[in-house]
Image: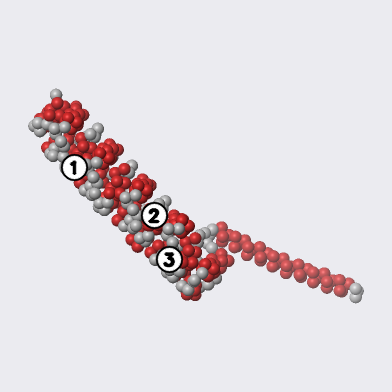
Amino acid sequence: MKILIPVVLSYLLIVLLLNLFSKKRNKYEADNLEDNQKEEENPDNITDKEDEKAEYLMANEEACIIAKKVESELEAQYVMSQNSSEAVQIAMAQTKNFEAQKYLLKFPDLSAEALVTICEKPSNFNFENDIVERWFMDALNRTKLTPKQEIRISQKGKNFVISKALILKNDLSADGLVELCRNPGHMNLDSDTVRKWYLDALDRIVPSEEHQLKMVATGNFAILRALMLSKNLKGATLATISESPGSMNLDSEIIWNWFEKAVKRTDLTTSQQVRMAEAKNFASNRAIILNPNIVYEAFLAICKDTKSFNMKNDMVQRYFRDATRRLLPSLSDKQKVELAQTKIEGVLKGLM
C-alpha cells in the first residue's frame, strides 16, 4: 500500500503537467490563428516587429546635428546607417562638404530634395573630371524629381555638367525642358552635340502645344531648330515660328528646307496656313506654296502680297503655276476670278 501511494501521486502529477502543457499549447495555437487571421484581413498593415525595424537607430534631430558636421565619407556612411531620412540627407547636403555630397550622390536611396540641394549649392567638385560627371549623371537619372524640382535645378544649377545631366534625364518633364530652354546654363547652344540633346529631348518628351510655344518665346536658334526638326512639332508652333523666327537666317536654303519639310509633316489648320502665308518671310511663304495640301485661303493671301518672292524668277513663277493647278479642281468660279485678278503670270498659266 505504501508503495502504491507514491506511484499514484506521480501519475497524478504527470497528468496535471500534461493538462497545463495542453492548455498553453492550445492558447499559443489560438493566438497564432488570431494573428494569422488579422494578417489575412489586413495584408497591407505592418506588424509591430516591422515597425521596429523601420524605425531609425537615431532620432532625426540628433542625426541632423551630426550630419551638419560630417567631414569624411566614413562619417557620412555612419550617419546614413543610423538615419537616412530626407531631413538628415538635406542637412548633410547643405554642408557643401565634398565628402558628404559625394557620398550622397552615390547613396542608393538619395532623396530628391537632397539632390536638388546639392545641385543648387555644389561643393568644390572638379566638374571637368569624368568620374564627377558620372556621379551627377547617375544621380539625376535614377532620382524621381518633380517638375518644380527640375526647374529649381535649371535655374540655379548653372554648371554645364548639371545642365547636361538634366537634359539627358530619361524622365525629364516638359516643364523642366522649357526651363532648360530659358536657362541653358553654360551649355554651348552653338554646339551640334548640345543641339542634338535638345532635339532628342523634344522627341522623347512630346511637349504640348503650350510648352512648345513657351520654347519659341526664347527666340534662341538652337531651340527653334530643335522644334523645326522635331517629329512632335505642332501646327500652332510652326505658325508662331514663321511669325517670330528669332535669329534664324531666313536667307539660308537649309532653313527653307526645314520649313518645307515641317509643313509637309505637320497637320496645319486653314488659319495656321494663312498665318504662315501672311508672315512676310520667304522661307515660310515658300513652304506654304509648295505644300501639297495648300488651302485656297493661304494661297490667295500669298498672291495678294508677293513681296517676299522674286517674281521675275522662272522658278518662282512655276511655284505659283503648280500651286494653282493643285487647287484648280476644288476652286469655285468666284475663287478663279479672285486669283485671275492678281495678274500673276504663273497663276494665269495654272488657270488655263
Q: Secondary structure at mark 1?
A: loop
With 118 as the anchor, is 26 left or right in this view? right
Q: Earlier in the sequence, mark 1 or mark 2?
A: 2
Depth order, front residue of 74/89: 74
Helix, strand or loop at disc 2?
A: helix
The three-letter code of the residue at mark 1 reads Asn
Earlier sequence position, callout 3 versus callout 2: 3
* Numbered disc in front, either 3 or 2: 3
Q: Determine the residue positioned at 30% across, 49% down.
A: 222
Q: Is residue 166 left or right of residue 47?
A: left
Q: Which residue position holds label 1?
A: 281
* Residue 33 position (above or below residue 88): above
The C terminus lies in quadrant: top left
Q: How many marks?
A: 3
At 23% from the left edge and 37% from the top edge, which residue is drawn? 287
Q: Which mark is residue 124?
A: 3
- What's the distance in space between the residues labelled 3 and 2, CA to CA? 18 Å
Note whether 38 is above or below 231 in the view shown: below
User: Residue 66 location, x and y as percent?
Assistant: 49, 74
Calculate the distance from the C-alpha at mark 1 to the C-alpha at mark 2: 34 Å
Which corner quadrant holds the N terminus? bottom right
* Nearer to us in this view, 152 or 250: 250
Question: At label 2, which amino acid type do we have?
Answer: Lys
Q: Nearer the viewer, mark 3 or mark 1?
A: 3
Mark 2, residue position: 164
Q: Nearer the viewer, residue 154 or 51?
A: 154
Neighbor class of circle 2 (other Cα within 10 Å; few <14, some 14-19, many 20+) is many
Crowd around label 1: few <14 · some 14–19 · many ≥20 (10 Å) = some
Q: What is the distance, in whole Å, between disc 3 and disc 1 at their CAs?
A: 49 Å
What is the image's colouring?
secondary structure
Please name the amino acid that badge 3 sits on: Asn
In the rendering, at what x and y percent does residue 318 appear?
18, 29
